[in-house]
Image: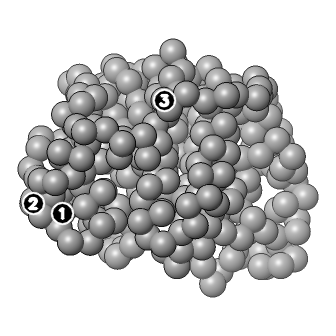
């Protein structure tokens, strides 16, 4: 990990799974990416964090435009509330569709020598943030020897575009379902198998129900992830009230939405 100032950081949040199933919920797992990015900012390794909501990517993959628009607005609202509740500053949320409407982005897109529209957009995103927003670090998630994580795009970018960037990775998201133990940390297609970042989520009840559905082993793997996220919070932000694992996770969710409001969004959302 770099130890000198690297400008800004960005990471993307997808809205569809690899099988094109819509992700209608935001899982607790996304906090691993938020806390990693915030840690780098507080350590003065970066000075600003960007989140890109990949709405146009989902549409390019064949998802329904109206459905994606609705989910993108929902995701922006959730993330804005979470950043506010956690009192994170110097963060900006952008939608990919906003970038795609600019001449600057399309000029970059035209230079990417790939036919696959999703891959072209991924690489253009990285180049855009590097040149437009002084991004020196791209944050992603990775699976050891994985084929469906973000390392493939980053390797492709380095070989085809070659702008100087650091790529760092968190662990993947987890689920309670032993048939599908890993997932992107921002995608949830089965809310029974994940803790959700949602005001209505009851962590204790969710884990108890998941144990009945998926067994103790599946839930045990997921609670290990919860522990690591709580540890990241206490290391980066500060202490949480004492309690068992479910109680501390619940407290963290409550904290994320303590400033929940209704927002009318401009194209870009800035938490300053």
Q: What number is the disc on residue 268?
A: 3
Q: Residue at x 16, y 54 (%)?
A: 110
User: Could you tell whether 230 is left or right of 13 in the image?
Assistant: right
Give the labeled residue for mark 1. 156
For the residue pair 212 and 200, the one nearer the viewer reads as 200
Residue 218: x %, y % from top left: 70, 74
| First along the sequence among labels 1 and 3 | 1
Q: CA distance from mark 3 to mark 2?
A: 30 Å
Give the labeled residue for mark 2. 159
Q: Secondary structure at mark 3?
A: strand
Residue 82: x %, y % from top left: 65, 33
| First along the sequence among labels 3 and 2 | 2
Q: Residue at x 48, y 63 (%)?
A: 59
User: Could you tell whether 113 is left or right of 95 in the image?
Assistant: left
User: Could you tell whether 145 is left or right of 112 in the image?
Assistant: right
Q: Secondary structure at mark 2?
A: helix
Q: Residue at x 41, y 34 (%)?
A: 50
Q: Give the quadrant of residue 86.
A: top right
């Amino acid at each position: 990990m770099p130890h000198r100032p690297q400008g800004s950081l960005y990471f993307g949040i997808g809205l569809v799974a690899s099988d094109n199933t819509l992700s209608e919920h935001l899982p607790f797992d996304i906090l691993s990416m938020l806390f990693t990015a915030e840690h780098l900012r507080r350590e003065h390794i970066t000075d600003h964090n960007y989140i890109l909501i990949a709405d146009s990517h989902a549409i390019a993959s064949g998802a329904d435009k109206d459905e994606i628009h609705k989910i993108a607005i929902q995701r922006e609202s959730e993330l804005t509330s979470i950043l506010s509740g956690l009192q994170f500053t110097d963060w900006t949320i952008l939608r990919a569709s906003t970038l795609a409407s600019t001449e600057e982005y399309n000029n970059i897109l035209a230079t990417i020598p790939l036919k696959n529209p999703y891959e072209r957009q991924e690489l253009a995103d990285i180049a855009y943030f590097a040149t437009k927003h002084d991004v020196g670090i791209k944050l992603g998630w990775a699976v050891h020897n994985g084929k469906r994580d973000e390392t493939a795009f980053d390797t492709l970018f380095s070989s085809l575009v070659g702008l100087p960037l650091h790529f760092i990775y968190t662990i993947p998201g987890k689920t309670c379902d032993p048939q599908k133990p890993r997932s992107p940390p921002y995608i949830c297609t089965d809310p029974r198998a994940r803790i959700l970042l949602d005001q209505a989520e009851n962590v204790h009840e969710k884990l108890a129900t998941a144990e009945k559905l998926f067994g103790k082993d599946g839930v045990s793997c997921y609670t290990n992830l919860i522990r690591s996220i709580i540890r990241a919070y206490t290391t980066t932000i500060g202490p949480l009230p004492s309690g068992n694992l479910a109680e501390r996770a619940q407290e963290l969710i409550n904290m994320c939405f303590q400033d929940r409001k209704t927002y009318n969004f401009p194209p870009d959302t800035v938490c300053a």
